Image: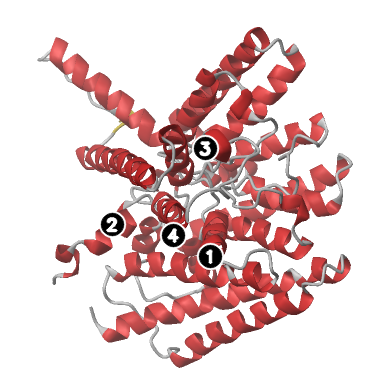
Amino acid sequence: MRTDDFKAVLRFIGLMLMAEGGLMALCLIPAIHFADGTARAVATSSAFTLAVGALMWVSFNRYRHIDDRRMSYLLVTLLWLVLTLFGALPLMATGATARITLAFFESMSGLTTTGATIFSDVATLPASVLLWRSMLQWFGGFGIVLLVLALTPRLGINRYALYTAEASGADNTGKTAVKTSVTVRRTLAIYLALTAFFIVALRASGMHIWDAVCLTFTNISSGGFSVASDGIASYTYLQQYILATAMLLSGVNFTLLYLFLTFRWRKIGHKLDQVTFYLLICILAILVTAATLHFESDMSVNDSLRLATVQGISSLTTTGTVAADTTLWPIPLTFLLLILSLCGGMAGSTSGGLKVMRILILLRNARSIYLGRTHPRAINPVRLNGRPVSSHIRANVMVIFLVFVLTLMVGTMLLMLCGIDAIEAIGATVGCLTGYGPGLGPSGGFGSYAAFTPAALWLCTALMLLGRLECMTVLVLFLPRFWRR
C-alpha cells in the first residue's frame, strides 16, 4: 500500500466530513425554533466537524489519484467508521447521552439505516437531536460512497470498483448508462424527488411539517426511526398508508424507478423478474399476516389489513417502522417478520438484507440442481430476466449467502456470551445485520436496546456495519493475502 494512496483516501474522507458538518448545521433550525437549549452544542459539533474535514481536504488536496484498487474497500470502511464517530458528537454534546458506547451505537444505527435505538422514550429528546437522528438515516440511506461519486467529479480510482465495494455483488444489471457517475446522479435525483414528494404528501394529509420531514427522512431511507415513542401508531390511517407506500418504493431498485418515471418502460420489461418476485413476496406477506391477525387475534378486517400492510412492507424492506407492538402478536408472525427482513428489498435500493435478487438466484439455482439430478442429460441453465446467469455470479451469490449465515450464527453466539437471552440474541443479530432494527423480546416492537450491556452494544454496532457493507467489504480487509502484491 502506497502512502500517497492512503493520503488520497484521507482527502475524500475530509470531503464527506464537510458534508456531514453542513448537515449538522441544519439542525440549528429546530434548535432555535423550538428553543430546546441545544443550539450552542449543535453549532460547536458542526463547526468542529467542518474544521476537521476542511483541514484534511486542504492538507491532502494534492493527492487526487488512487492507483490501488484495494483502496476502494479501505475507503468505504473508513468512511463509515469516521462519519459514525463524528455523527455521535451532537448526541453527546446536547446531553442526549453521555456515553460514547451509546452515542456510537446510535450514530451507526442512523448511518446504516438500521433503526435500532437505545432511547426508550424518543419523544423526550430535543428537537435538534430528533432531526439529526432522522437526517443521519437519510444521509446513509442514499449511500455514503454514492455521495462521494456524485460530489467528486474525478476520483482517480476505478468508479465501478468503488460503487460495488459498498454492496458486494451489486446488481450491475441496474445501470442505465455506461458511466457509473451518470447512474449515481440519476439515483440521487430519484432519491431527492421521492423525499420531496412524500414530505408534501404527508403534509397534505394533515401531518405537522416537523413530523412529515423527519418521518420521510427515516422511511424513504428504509431507516424506520420515529419521532414518537409509539412508532407511527398515533398517526392517522391515511398517513400510515402513505408511509407504507414510501417504504415500498424505497425497496425498489432506484434505476428502475428512474426508467419508469422517464417513460422508458421497454427497458423495464427486460428486468421484471426481480420486481415481480419482490411484489409477490410483499403481497403474500400482507395476506398471511392479515389473515392471522384477523382469525387469531380477533382483529377487524380493516385493522388487520392496515397493520399487515405496514409491518409486512416494513419488514421486507428492512425499514423497521412499527405501527403496533409486534411482540404481542402470535409467535409465528414475529418470526415471519424476522424472516422477511432476512430477504430484504431489491438490489439498488435503500433496503438491507440479502436482497430478493440473490434469493431468486439461489432458488433457481437449487431448482436447476434438482432437475439435474432427476434428468442428468437435460440442460437447465439458471436464468434471470430471460438471460442465463453466469457461474461467476452464482458463486458470488452463494459466497455472500454463506458468509451472511455464518455471521448470523457467530453474532448470535457472541451476544449470548454477553448475557443476552437466546431468543433476543437471535432477534438482535438479525435486526442489526439486516438493518431491520427491532428484534425479539424487549428490543422488539416499541422497545429499545437500552438494556444491552456495553459489550453487546459494541457487537451490535459491528453487525450493523457488516450488514450495511454486506460483510465481504469489511472482512476482506483482515485477510493478509488481500494486502500482498
User: Residue 432: x percent and y percent?
Assistant: 47, 46
Amino acid, disc 2: Leu
Identity of the amino acid at label 4?
Answer: Thr
Which mark identifies residue 439? Answer: 3
Q: Residue furthest top?
A: 295
Determine whether the residue tagged by mark 2 lies in a helix, strand or loop: helix
Which element carries disc 1, helix, strand or loop? helix
Around disc 1, counting alpha carbons within 10 Å, would you say few (fewer than 14), some (14 to 19), or many (20 or more)?
Answer: some
- Numbered circle sitting on residue 462: none
Compare marks 3 and 1 and give the one earlier in the sequence. 1
> Where does the image place residue 120, in percent across and percent down from the top left?
66, 48
Q: Which residue corresponds to mark 1?
A: 147
Per the image, the residue denoted by label 2 is 475
The residue type indicated by label 3 comes to Gly
Q: Quadrant of residue 174?
A: top left
Q: How far apart are marks 3 and 1 (CA)?
A: 30 Å
Which tag is nearer the camera, tag 3 or tag 4? 3
CA–CA distance between discs 2 and 4?
25 Å
Q: Where is residue 451 in the image (x, y as percent from the top left)?
A: 55, 48
Residue depicted at x 66% and y 83%:
47
Left or right: 342 with respect to 481?
right
Q: Quadrant of the N terminus?
A: bottom left
Residue 3 drawn above or below residue 311: below
